[in-house]
Image (cartoon, helix red, strand yellow):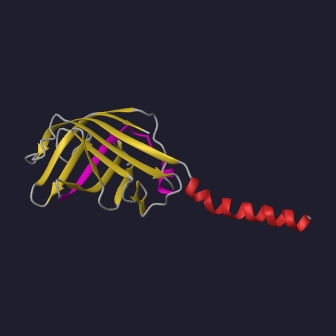
Amino acid sequence: MYLRRRSLLLSVAVPLLALCPLMAANITYTISGTLGPVLSGSDPLGANGQSGILTAVVSTTAVPTSTTKTSATYTLPVGAITVNIGGTVYGTTGAATLKYTFPPAGPDNIVITAPISADGVKSTVVGTASLAKGSFTAAVTKHPRKFTPSPQTLTAATKAGGAGSQVSYTASILGKSVLGLSGTASN
């Protein structure tokens, strides 16, 4: 009788332990707001003045693909990122990346890079959310973490590649366009 109970217990416990990583909690980052002004490029998609939403879902047990003292980059599977520009949803067509930066000076950032298809044209979208200093700690070099406080107000960049929040999209036949992003970031 004792052996049967032990076998039954093991037959239940082993599959549950195997499933534990699959049942890990996720963090959903949402960066949303109004796109604009155009900081560089011709904006052939007409995104200036449109709503923009980038959503990233990442497991709290994910491990970074690269780290430095002030950053961590995670590779996310197809479908982990959703891009919505002006009400048009673009799914990812390949692996995406989520990068946390927390430099000694200046704001912390989340940078989401995702390959998408826009009207059959392969493109890359990069969204940068400029967050308050201290939103992240070095713990994100081990596993993804929520930022605090949440939500945070995003101020649009005034220069491509400069300080502030921005979204860029690049397509081989359309070139690269960079727009500011004002709105909110939450998790």
Quadrant in the rendering for residue 153:
top left
Residue 4, image quadrant: bottom right
Where residue 179 appears, as percent x and y from the top left, is: 18, 42
84 in relation to 49, above or below = below
Locate residue 174, reporting x and y percent.
10, 55
- Location of the N terminus by quadrant is bottom right
Residue 131 among magenta residues:
yes
| Residue at image location 20% in from the left, 49% down from the top | 168
Image coordinates for residue 73, horizontal then vertical, percent? 39, 58
Q: Nearer the viewer, residue 140 or 183?
A: 183
- Residue occupying image coordinates x 39% and y 53%: 80
Taking depth in this image into account, of 20 and 4 the one nearest to the observer is 4
**Viewer-nearest residue: 68 or 170:** 170
Position in image of residue 127 (x %, y %): 28, 47
Total marks placed: 0
Task: Work out which quarter of the rendered image holds the C terminus and state it.
Answer: top left
157 versus 116 height, above or below: above
Q: Inspect the magenta stretch and tell me whether residue 71 lies in it.
A: no
Measured along the vertical axis of the image, is residue 95 above or below residue 34? Answer: below
Q: Kindly identify the residue that appears in the image at 13 percent across and 46 percent down.
A: 45
Task: Write the start and end of the magenta stretch as one range.
Answer: 121-142
Horizontal side of residue 20 vs 14, given as left or right:
left
User: Horizontally, is 101 left or right of 17 in the view?
Assistant: left
- Which residue appears at 74% of the width and 65% of the height? 11
